[in-house]
Image (cartoon, coloured by chain):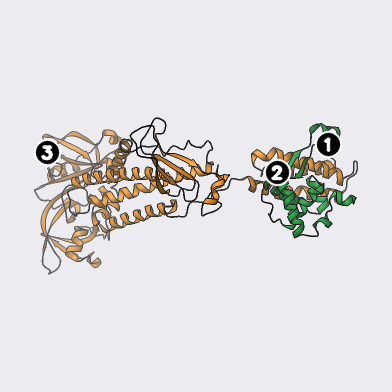
Chain colours: A green, B orange
Amino acid sequence: MAAETKLSHTAAMILQAVNAGYVYGFSVMEMTGLPSGTVYPAMRRLERDELIRSSWEQQAIADAGQRPPRKYYKLTRSGKLTLEASRKRYPLLAKLIPSEQEEQV
Amino acid sequence: MTLRPSALCELLCLALLRGASLLVPARQREEWWREWRAELWHVRRTYTAEQSFSWMAEREVAAFCLGALPDALSFREQFQQRRIPLATTMGSATQCVQVLFGLIAISYGVAMLLPEVSAILHFSAYRDTKNLMLLRDAHSSDDSVATISAEQYQVWKRRRQELFNGFAFYQVAEQSLSIENSVATKGAVASASSNLFDLLGLRVRYAREAPGSLPRLILSEQMWKRRFGGDPHIFGRMVQVGSESAMVSGVVDPGEWRLPGKTDAWLLLPHDLGFSERVGFVVAHLQSPHADWGEAWHMSAPTPAGTANDFFCESLTERTRGPGDVFLFAVLLACLALPATTSLPLGEYRASSRRLSRFTRVRRWSFLGCKLVLLLPIVYFVSLDLAHLRSGMDPVTSEYIQLLSAFSVCLFGLRWSLRDQRQRCPVCLGKLTNPARVGQPSRSFLDWNGTELICVSGHGLLHVPEMATSWFSEQRWLYLDASWEILFAEPGFVTPGYF
């Protein structure tokens, strides 16, 4: 997917949330306040467009926590470029969902 | 055992997720289900406390689960194979089908304009033709010659019958027809027993009943139009037929009369009185227990003189047969001859290891089937048109012309269908264009030369070898992937979706 891909505000928020460390669907929901019926389909589309990629948590880690393994999402290289472009388009994005480093600062 | 409300809610949520998972394509369903179940576990843990039950919390969990439905639908949309639209350029499948429909309409229109073909198409079969037998003297081999006397007919009719349950008699003779004081017209009139048309099941238009002892005159369409100008008020009026007075009682459509003897009118005599000494024809209806006797057989029967004579009984099946049998026979012959005139494969598409989607393959075969189905009525009507182009042609000659023309047109049509199919893109069914000769014409079998055609929508290239070699005997199709899309005018056509 080209870096200049224009995302909707919702998609940009979700991308920003994933980048900020909210790496599974429910945490993105909690962070953005969006319902599950919006967040999960949007994440599917972002993954289809190769802006994020998913991976399953190791079974051993999930077993240690006595819970089912979760599916984690992570930004791809083109996802980061697209997010950069989206931040310029939506200047408040970074303020709405500050990334972990920004929070520490 | 009682079910706790929280457990019941959990079960309902899982059932909702399971139901939504059915919307997800089977290949991705398991992973989708795993993700949503894991997320639900975390959502439930976040919102609900261990041992207590809260409607508010359950409502949050349920709202979360309801989001699975749009997600499943979006997932389904995303992974569902994209249907490639049919080509819309010149030579598209739709245009081809439209042309075939146009040809059907034209050939049918011509058939309607030709009176003989129109009569054949509107022919209503006689009733129970298999059991309707035409009787003649066994010493006569020509069934168009009258051989039975009216006296013989009366003998059969009077005697108790085990074979037949109905007889009708007619004798054809030239007679004059005149209405009131007008000039008399000569015509071939069949003096017949009153039950003739009922026995045959022949349809009579404008049918009028006549008083008990009055003969009825049924006109042929040709006589009605020629002599009476097609006047519908003629029915019910009296005419003089030879020495008999009769009431005009109806018209028989052209082509309906299939029995021997060309007739312009039928004079139905009540009570079988008034037959001349001349010989005529007898039609009899076989009783159902003898229906399996076959279409022709001999029988011996008493004569008016008290002796016995041999008679030949022949079913009317052959006489009342429509042109459909000749057409079907011609189609069968054309199908048998087809492999000898062209190659049957639709092209070798082995150059790609990928397979077309089921929908695309079904669509391609449906198009071929549609062409073949539409071809049949064209062949039928065209062959009938050619066979009856000249009116008054001998029926046997017409039949031969129909057979020959149906065979030729059908063979040509089948060859065209296969050839056309081979020259079309298997994906969008558009006609391949821009033929380009490649390679040098050579006598060496090692050199490649042939023709390449391309799909204008960019789905692929067709290589047709100039001469068959052991390694490249038939045409080959090369699919183009999405990376070629930029070269073609209609973006979005070339996608991996169709594989």
Q: Residues within 10 Å of mark 3 (few under 14, many from 20)?
A: few
Residue closest to the eye, B461 or B216: B461
Q: Which residue is mark 3?
A: B140
Q: Is residue B316 left or right of residue B29?
A: left
Q: Would you place residue B108 above or below residue B51 in this image?
A: below
Of pointers 2 and 3, the one earlier in the residue sequence = 2
SS for callout 1: loop
Q: Is residue B231 left or right of residue B105?
A: left
Q: Cα distance, mark 2 to mark 3? A: 82 Å
Residue corresponding to mark 2: B19
The quadrant in which residue B232 appears is bottom left
Name the subunit of mark 3: B
- Which x, y percent locates residue B88? 47, 55
- The span from disc 2 to disc 1 (Cα, nearest Å) is 23 Å
Q: Nearer the viewer, mark 2 or mark 1?
A: 1
Q: Can the viewer see residue B59 in this picture?
A: no
